[in-house]
Amino acid sequence: MGLNSKTLGNYGLLLAVLTLAACTWVRPDTGADEVLVLPKERVADCERLGSVEVSVLARVVGMDRHEEEVESDLQVLARNHAVERGGDTVVPLSEIKDGEQRYGIYSCQGNQAGEGEPEADEDEEEGVTVQQYNG
């Protein structure tokens, strides 16, 4: 039984979809590579600048993207936003849900992130910006 052009075309389409589902599309802005992603307990001595909710596509052509790629893209968006706000550290404030996650933005320059007691959780909506990337 040989492969016909329709079967080969279907395999090609499947390969393209699987490749897209594994892609990272978000690129760091200048300076974003220096922004740290830390857990909340490591920013006790840092200044909180606000927060941002970022989102990316979690599904492409009906297929879920790899969780690691979605997480990586969300972190890059959060780090990019931190640079715009003068921050040098971001902290995940929520779990990833449907390609969305909320981050706190901090300035830790001159502070040693990771020392001290965990900062109290602030549920302020002030300073929240939604930044969506639909590459």
Image (cartoon, rainbow, N blue to C red):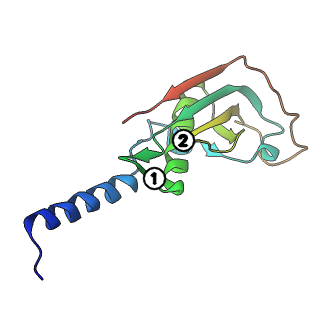
Using the rendered view, name the quadrant where residue 47 is placed.
Answer: top right
- Please give left or right for residue 11 compared with residue 127 in the image: left
* Element assignment for label 2: loop
Residue that lies at the very extreme toward the front in this rendered image: 1
- Please give left or right for residue 21 compared with residue 125 in the image: left
64 or 118, nearer to the observer:
64
Give the number of marks: 2
- Identify the residue at image location x=70%, y=40%: 94
> Can you say whether 64 is above or below 49 in the image?
below
- Please give left or right for residue 79 compared with residue 60 in the image: right
> Can you say whether 12 is above or below 130 in the image?
below
Mark 1 belongs to which amino acid? Answer: Arg
Using the rendered view, name the quadrant where residue 85 is placed.
Answer: top right
Label 1 neighbour load within 10 Å: few <14, some 14-19, many 20+: many
* Element assignment for label 1: loop
**Quadrant of the drawing holding the C terminus:** top left
- Identify the residue at image location x=63%, y=31%: 87
- Identify the residue at image location x=70%, y=47%: 38
The residue beneath circle 1 is 65
Using the rendered view, name the quadrant where residue 127 is placed.
Answer: top right
Whether residues under marks 2 and 1 lie with C-beta atoms below 8 angstroms apart, the answer is: yes
Q: Residue 132 placed where, x, y %?
A: 48, 29
Q: Residue 65 placed where, x, y %?
A: 45, 52
Residue that lies at the very extreme toward the top in this rendered image: 126
Residue 99: give its label: 2
Mark 2 belongs to which amino acid? Answer: Gly
Label 2 neighbour load within 10 Å: few <14, some 14-19, many 20+: some
Q: Residue 6 placed where, x, y %?
A: 12, 62
First reached walking from the N terminus: tag 2 or tag 1? 1
